[in-house]
Image: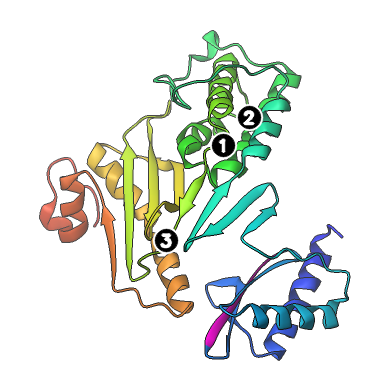
Amino acid sequence: YGCLRSALLFYLKLVADLEGQGFRLNPYDPCVANKLVTRAQMTLTFHLHDIKILHVDPLEVTQCIEWFKSIYGTDVRISRGTTHDYLGVMLSYSNKQVRISMADYVKKVINGFIEDIHGSASTPGAENLFQIRNEEARVKLNYEQAQCFHSTVAKLLFVTMRCRRDIQTAVASLATRVTEPDEDDWAKLRRVLKYLHGTAYLSLALDASNLTFMRWWVDASFAIHPDYKSHTGEVLLLGKGGVIGISRKQRLNTKSSTEAEVVGVDDASSQILWTNYSIKAQGYQINETLVYQDNQSAILLEKNGKQSSGKRTRHMNI
């Protein structure tokens, strides 16, 4: 258990067993399998040896569980109902909506920090979030603090990718500093933890009220990093709540905010296309995908290409 080869062997056996029962993998997500059961689609999603079964008929779910027991043994832990606790993530289903919370996990992260965290902060990041001192003015952390910094940021990445979109930008910035963090980075991390201390019970509510219309918001902050690279943020809504949220540093330098916005959309395009293909493979028809931006020049370049180039963007081969 815990070895790469054993995980692969289990996955291959699981897939073979499912395909033997008529399930077909989603070609864009090898951990999602579907089968038509009593005129409704049954969907199985799996992570390592944990499997989630979805079907409108609870009886069909029960029969699927019994089939798994016949193959893998009866020593199976089963969680059914509207509330589930999985890897520190609380999932609560009600009224065609799922609410995702990690309050207990967030408290463990705060309590495991080597300094006491009290009070609260109004925002996870201050105006100096992306500001870095010159090398001679920096005071690097000692080994114990540096290890704690790295570990805590990794745990916060786990939190932000699952439900706490509000700390995503701050954590993405701190993630670029784990190699050689300094006292300023330590203070920024403490601010994030203070913010979480006061908002531990915040949750993410999601619904997919309209799977035929995908709305993406993509934005970029120009030359915000110390090496003058820009930062991209993107979020997907299928109804209520950000289903997908990404905040990351751009990999190349740009000459203007317009160019940074175009690069941001280009960075987001792979996620946008994959999401479209994956949802279509689940049997849903997507009629429209709309990307929102707040830079008119970037929008014109993306629509018209070279025809909308100006002096500051004519070097771009669009």
Callout 2 crowding tier (Cα within 10 Å): few <14, some 14–19, many ≥20: few
Q: Is residue 314 visible?
A: no
Q: Is residue 57 left or right of residue 278?
A: right
Name the residue beneath numbered marker 3.
270
Instruction: Name the foreground residue: 299 vs 237.
Output: 237
Quadrant housing the N terminus: bottom right
Instruction: Name the foreground residue: 125 vs 175.
Output: 125
First in sequence, mark 2 or 1: give its number.
Answer: 2
Label 2 or label 3, whichever lies nearer to me, is 3
Q: Position of residue 298 (x, y in %)?
A: 21, 48
Q: Position of residue 185 (x, y in %)?
A: 56, 21
Distance of mark 1 from mark 3, alpha carbons? 33 Å
Q: Is residue 86 left or right of residue 216?
A: right
Number of marks in the rendered image: 3
Name the residue beneath numbered marker 2.
179
Q: Which residues lie in the magenta part?
A: 40-47
Quadrant housing the C terminus: bottom left
**Residue 41 falls inside the magenta stretch:** yes
Q: Position of residue 48 (x, y in %)?
A: 73, 63
Label 1 or label 3, whichever lies nearer to me, is 1
Q: Secondary structure at mark 1?
A: loop
Name the residue beneath numbered marker 1.
201
Q: Is residue 14 visible?
A: yes
Q: Is residue 58 above or below residue 84?
A: below
Main SS class of the magenta portion in the image: strand
Q: Is residue 206 above or below residue 311?
A: below
Residue at the (32%, 50%) spot, across then down: 217
Q: Secondary structure at mark 2?
A: loop
Label 2 or label 1, whichever lies nearer to me, is 1
First in sequence, mark 2 or 3: give its number.
Answer: 2
